[in-house]
Amino acid sequence: MKKFILMFTLCSPMLVFASEKCTTDSTREIVQEQLEIKTDVPSHLKGATIIVRLADGKESVVPAELFKVVPRKQQFLVSKTKVVSKLTCSPELNKNRLTILAGNGPENELGVSKTSSSVTVESQMGAIGGLQYQRMILDGLSLGVQAQTNDSVLLNIGLDF
């Protein structure tokens, strides 16, 4: 029966359940964009030319379809405030841990037999089981207690990394 319980315990799957803890961080940043303003050429200026007389006396001739007094494709710098939201999810730490133990080890007390010339100490090996409880006391540090069927009680400190 002990071997059946031992094999059942070792073969049963252990499931870990973790819920997600999500936080949203919003940041604001100022972004500069270029805004283009395009205008259509009026019908009476199609095919017309614009003559620009420069300071040194030279003349420059440009088509009215591309220019007015300033270039038809105008650009302005515009400042906008952009809000960026970032969603971060991480599994929430479980604060408690319960473990079922199974293995092979010394079963009961030591058997001692004495003769006039010798002392014989014996221990019986066999299947043992146990139960362990741990509680996380700090982020990455846990404290626990363990009891086994061979009358052993243990305290433990765990470090998660």
Image (cartoon, grey):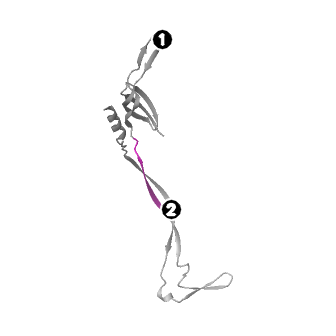
Element assignment for label 2: strand
- Magenta segment, prevailing SS (helix, strand or loop): strand
Quarter placement of the N terminus:
top left
Residue sitting farthest toward the left: 1
Q: Amino acid at mark 1?
A: Ser
Question: How far is the residue under mark 2 from the one under mark 1?
Answer: 94 Å
Element assignment for label 1: loop
Rendered view: 15 above or below 46: above
Rendered view: 101 above or below 42: above
Rendered view: 27 above or below 131: below
In this rendering, position of residue 108 left or right of residue 65: left
In this rendering, position of residue 22 left or right of residue 1: right
Q: Position of residue 86 (x, y in %)?
A: 44, 54
Question: Residue at position x 47%, y 88% from top?
Answer: 43
Q: Which residues are magenta?
A: 80-93
Rendered image: mark on residue 31: 2
Q: Which residue is mark 1?
A: 117
Q: Quadrant of residue 61?
A: bottom right
Question: Residue at position x 49%, y 57% from top?
Answer: 29
